[in-house]
Amino acid sequence: MVREVTFKVYQFDELSEEVKEKVLDNYRFIMVEYFNWWEFIYEDAENIGFEIVEFDLYRRYIRMKLKENILSSIEEALNLFNKDSNEYKIVKEYYDEIMKLKDSEEVKEYLKDNPEGDPYDAIYNLNLGEEFEDEYVKDMSRFFLKMLEEEFKYLTSDEAIIEMFEANDYEFFETGKVFYEREFVSNNELKVI
């Protein structure tokens, strides 16, 4: 016996408000449970010489490790952060403080032994600025934890979930259940009207 079944599917914006809320709640964590959503933030940290060792958003905890010279990291961070941001201003303060060391005795001694060098080379090669390292790591940890929190908050927002539905052409039954075409296709072709 052959039966013909007809049903109607909807785009997200065609669902009732009550069903939309239900769908959003059901899919609230889809983009953070099934994807490595933190990867781009980890890459940003690597680009400025850091490794994010671990983080826990629930406990507001992050552990980061500086893997390169502090001056190199600071210069890369100045390129990463927006010039109008508080993060940029704080990183710039570190840079300015380290650059003040160009008149230090260590730099003068270095330049005596390396007449081809300049004060910047001396600061870099002597790894001056280490006294700022602990505070710098704490500030970067705070900044990157904030970035992770903001990314998580966005990815679990109504806006992001709706964008994901639209970008992937999700269709729904009137009840809010997602329509998966492959569930309805067996040996016969499914005719979409």
Image (tube, helix red, strand yellow):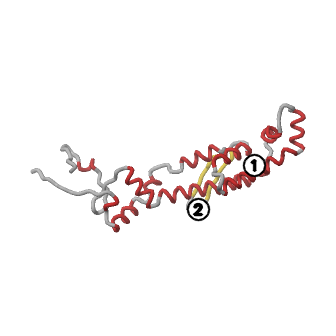
Going by the image, does 174 lie left or right of 159?
left
Q: Nearer the viewer, mark 2 or mark 1?
A: 1
The three-letter amino acid code for the residue at tag 2 is Arg
Tell me residue 87's x, y (percent). Answer: 66, 55
Tell me residue 69's x, y (percent). Answer: 73, 42
Going by the image, does 6 lie left or right of 91?
left
Q: Which residue is mark 2?
A: 59
**At 26% across and 56% down in the image, what residue appears?**
9
The three-letter amino acid code for the residue at tag 1 is Tyr
**Residue furthest out toward the front:** 84
Q: How many marks?
A: 2
Tell me residue 188's x, y (percent). Answer: 18, 44
Going by the image, does 27 lie left or right of 49?
left
Q: Answer with the quarter of the image where residue 26 lies.
A: bottom left
**At 67% across and 44% down in the image, what residue appears?**
76
Going by the image, does 85 lie left or right of 148?
right
Q: For the residues marked 2 and 1, what is the alpha-carbon distance in whole angstroms? A: 31 Å
Q: Which residue is mark 1?
A: 95
Front position in the image: 137 or 160: 160
Position of 90 relative to 111 (above/below): below
- Mark toward the start of the polypeptide (2 vs 1): 2
Circle 2 — which element? loop
**At 80% across and 45% down in the image, what residue appears?**
128
